[in-house]
Structures are given as structure tokens and as C-alpha cells.
Image (cartoon, rainbow, N blue to C red):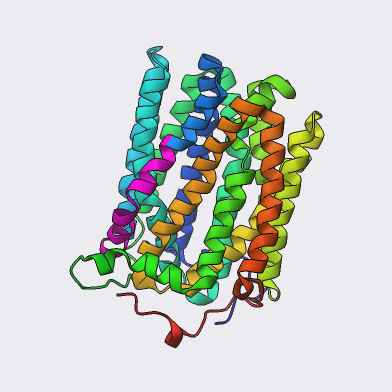
């Protein structure tokens, strides 16, 4: 497999369907960031509870876990483009519901958590569908380039979205939710207009063998198992996003706009790294560089937890984003290259649960630890844990550590996944 040359940084955009997908994903990610900032700040403002901040992540993660045997099979059996369109429409409905609660003055934990559960169900289906749709829109030689831009789409939204969300929330919460609703609606239309892409489907009746094929493949393929489990435990331990309202309000005293700056800082580092990787793809030492990225993420998390100076906290968060981007770039490219298309949805359903566990369940972990031991120890201990995971996984998965170039494996040695 020939990876895109260093000079062709926009290779993926030469495919119109991918360009539409990219901008739709950006708008959706932008809206998610606005909602995340607004809901987190509003929940803490209403309840002053770190535990409920952590619950925001948990209620969004549980649907992915409970529906894992369904979402991947649906993604492989039906149109991925249609699934993504429907899920984005449901996201718009959730944004509208949050707007309604705010307008009517009925914003409270119970109705908000009900909406977030619906949002979590939608994300349970959209996660594997989005991850599986992207490789259908570009040829294999442009996959690594597309994943660098996919990551930059999310991270750009992570920069602009939180700052915008904090600013809009400062104006009025209803403005924040209204903008998020408009962006979700626009993303829905863009995905719906993508021409139907080629998609390999397994024409067999649904059975337990079919449903569990994703688990079987991951168990067999140690490179994929190591990559997704590394992300699970690293971010599960090192995630501090849910606690940023506390840092912005009580430690750094920055207010809603300052919360947006904190939420944006990891994206600044990540987008800079994503642009670098899109221009200069990793050619050699891919496995080692992924582990180094995770270690940088852990060290920067520790610095952020200990800092009481705004500029140092923002710099630490930027390094967190840069380190995480290296890991994401290598992991997502390996996942796409090493996973056959006919099982991609089921494998990505498992991967989505791992990602959800690392993010949403990580937020719950952070909230609970903060409730019992305080916010600074919760973040610092998490950073130490992430650093330890990078070392332990490098020892446990030598196949992953020894990967040099980001190339497709020999398909003749892949397991029977039907």
C-alpha cells in the first residue's frame, strides 16, 4: 500500500464525497463541543456537584455498552451514510430539547440526563457508522491522509467549539443551544447529500457468529486489540475534561469564557500536530511513536493537575492534545488498514465502546475521585496511571510496539470473520 506523498497534504479532499463528510463531521463536532461546555457549566451552576458532572459522561457511555451487539451489525448490514444521517437528526432533536428546558427554566438533572441518554443511544449507532463510512469514501492510498484530516476536523472543533460555547453561554445559554441545533441540522443535510458509497456487505442471516465476529477479529488480531485497549486505559485514567468547570470556576477563576479556553487548549496542540502529520506522515517507528504520544499525554495531565497558573495550565493541555493526536493518528490508521470492510462496522462498534469508556467513563471516574479525594489528586493520579499504561502496554503488545510503517497486513493471514 502506497501512502500519500508528503507533498499532497490535501489528497483526501480530491474526493468530493469525503469533502462533504469532512465538513459535516466538523459541524457536528463543533455542535457537540458547544453542548458539552453549556451542559457542563449549567449543571455545575445549578447543582455545584462534581459527582453529577461525572454522571454526564456515564449516562452517555452506557448505551454504547448495552447496545454493542446491535450497533456494529446494523452498520455492516445497512447503509452507513443513512445511519449517520438519522443519528445526526436525533442529535439535533436533543439540542432542541436542551434549548426548550433552558427557555422554560426547567433545566434540572433528571430531564437533562434523559436527553443525554437519548444522545448516548444516537452516538452508540453513529460511532461505528462514522468510523466505517470514512474508509469507503477514499482509496486505500489516501486513508492515512484522510484520518489525519478527520482528527483535525474534530480537534479544530475542539479549539473553536469550547471557546465559542463559553462565549455564547456567557451571552445566554439559549444562544449556545440554538447555534448547536443549527450546526447539527446542517451536518444532517450534508451527510444525506453524499452519493451512496461502495460498501461490502456479508449476505448471511444474522446469527451469534455474525454478531460476535468483531470480538473474534479483535481477539485474534493483537495489533488491533493492543491499539484500542491502549486508548481505553490511557484516557480512562488521564481524562480531565469533566473537571474543567471546577478548574475554571474554583482554581484558576476564569469564568465561562475561561472554561472555553481550557477546553480549547488540547485542540490547539492536537490540530497543530494533525497538520504536521498530514504534511509529513509517519514513515517509520509508528508503534513506538504511538506509545511516546500516550506518555506525553500522561505527563502533561500531571502538570495540568498541579498547575495553579492559567498560562501553564493551557500549555499543559496543549501538550496533552498533541500527544493524544499522535496516538489517534497511528491507532485509527492501523484500525482501517488491518480491518476488512465487511466486518468493519462490528469491529468499530467494539472500538466505539472502548472510546466511550475512555471518555465518558473516564469523566465518571474523574468526578467520583474528585468527590472523595479532591480535584487536584484526581487529575494527578490519573496522569501517573496513563504514563504507567504506556509503559505496560509497550511490554504487553510487542507486535504493536514493533510496527514500523503504516501498511496494510497480509490479508491471507486474517481470521475467518464470517
Compared with 151, 15 (above or below) is below
Residues in magenta? 59-78
Q: Is residue 234 left or right of residue 141?
A: right
Camera sees residue 272 = no
- Front residue (pair 9, 392): 392
Q: Residue 269 location, x and y as percent?
A: 71, 48
Residue found at x 29% / y 61%: 73
Residue found at x 78% / y 30%: 310
Q: Residue 164 location, x and y as percent?
A: 59, 31
- Front residue (pair 205, 383): 383
Is residue 62 rendered magenta in the image? yes
Is residue 287 rendered magenta in the image? no
> Looking at the rendering, in which quadrant would you find the N terminus?
bottom right
- Front residue (pair 132, 169): 132
Most common SS among magenta residues: helix
Residue found at x 36% / y 43%: 63
> Looking at the rendering, in which quadrant would you find the C terminus?
bottom left
Residue found at x 38% / y 14%: 106
Amino acid at each position: 500500500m502506497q501512502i500519500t506523498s508528503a507533498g499532497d497534504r490535501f489528497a483526501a479532499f480530491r474526493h468530493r464525497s469525503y469533502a462533504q463528510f469532512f465538513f459535516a463531521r466538523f459541524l457536528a463536532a463543533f455542535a457537540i463541543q458547544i453542548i458539552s461546555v453549556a451542559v457542563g457549566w449549567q449543571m455545575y451552576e445549578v447543582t455545584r456537584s462534581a459527582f453529577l458532572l461525572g454522571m454526564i459522561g456515564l449516562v452517555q457511555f452506557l448505551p454504547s455498552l448495552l447496545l454493542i451487539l446491535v450497533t456494529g451489525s446494523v452498520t455492516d448490514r445497512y447503509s452507513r451514510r443513512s445511519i449517520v444521517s438519522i443519528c445526526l437528526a436525533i442529535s439535533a432533536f436533543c439540542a432542541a430539547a436542551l434549548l426548550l428546558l433552558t427557555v422554560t427554566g426547567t433545566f434540572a438533572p433528571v430531564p437533562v440526563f434523559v436527553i443525554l441518554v437519548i444522545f448516548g443511544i444516537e452516538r452508540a449507532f453513529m460511532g461505528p457508522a462514522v468510523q466505517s463510512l470514512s474508509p469507503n469514501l477514499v482509496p486505500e492510498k489516501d486513508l492515512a491522509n484522510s484520518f489525519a484530516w478527520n482528527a483535525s476536523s474534530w480537534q479544530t472543533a475542539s479549539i473553536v467549539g469550547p471557546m465559542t460555547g463559553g462565549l455564547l453561554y456567557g451571552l445566554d445559554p439559549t444562544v449556545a443551544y440554538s447555534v448547536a441545533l443549527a450546526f447539527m441540522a446542517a451536518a444532517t443535510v450534508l451527510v444525506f447529500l453524499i452519493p451512496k458509497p461502495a460498501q461490502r456487505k456479508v449476505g448471511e442471516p444474522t446469527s451469534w457468529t455474525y454478531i460476535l465476529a468483531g470480538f473474534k477479529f479483535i481477539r485474534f488480531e493483537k495489533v488491533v486489540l493492543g491499539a484500542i485497549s491502549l486508548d481505553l486505559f490511557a484516557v480512562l485514567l488521564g481524562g480531565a475534561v469533566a473537571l474543567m468547570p471546577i478548574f475554571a470556576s474554583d482554581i484558576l477563576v476564569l469564568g465561562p469564557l475561561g472554561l472555553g479556553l481550557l477546553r480549547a487548549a488540547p485542540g490547539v496542540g492536537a490540530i497543530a500536530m494533525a497538520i504536521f502529520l498530514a504534511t509529513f506522515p509517519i514513515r517509520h517507528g509508528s508503534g513506538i511513536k504511538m506509545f511516546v504520544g500516550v506518555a506525553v499525554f500522561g505527563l502533561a495531565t500531571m502538570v495540568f493537575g498541579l498547575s495553579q497558573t492559567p498560562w501553564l495550565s493551557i500549555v499543559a493541555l496543549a501538550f496533552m492534545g498533541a500527544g493524544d493526536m499522535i496516538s489517534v493518528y497511528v491507532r485509527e490508521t492501523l484500525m482501517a488498514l488491518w480491518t476488512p470492510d465487511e466486518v468493519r462496522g462490528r469491529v468499530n462498534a467494539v472500538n466505539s465502546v472502548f472510546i466511550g469508556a475512555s471518555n465518558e467513563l473516564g469523566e465518571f471516574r474523574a468526578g467520583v475521585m474528585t468527590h472523595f479525594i479532591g480535584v487536584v489528586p484526581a487529575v494527578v493520579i490519573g496522569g501517573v496511571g496513563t504514563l504507567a499504561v504506556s509503559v505496560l502496554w509497550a511490554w504487553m503488545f510487542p507486535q504493536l510496539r514493533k510496527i514500523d510503517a503504516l501498511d496494510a497486513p497480509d490479508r491471507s493471514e486474517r481470521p475467518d470473520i464470517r
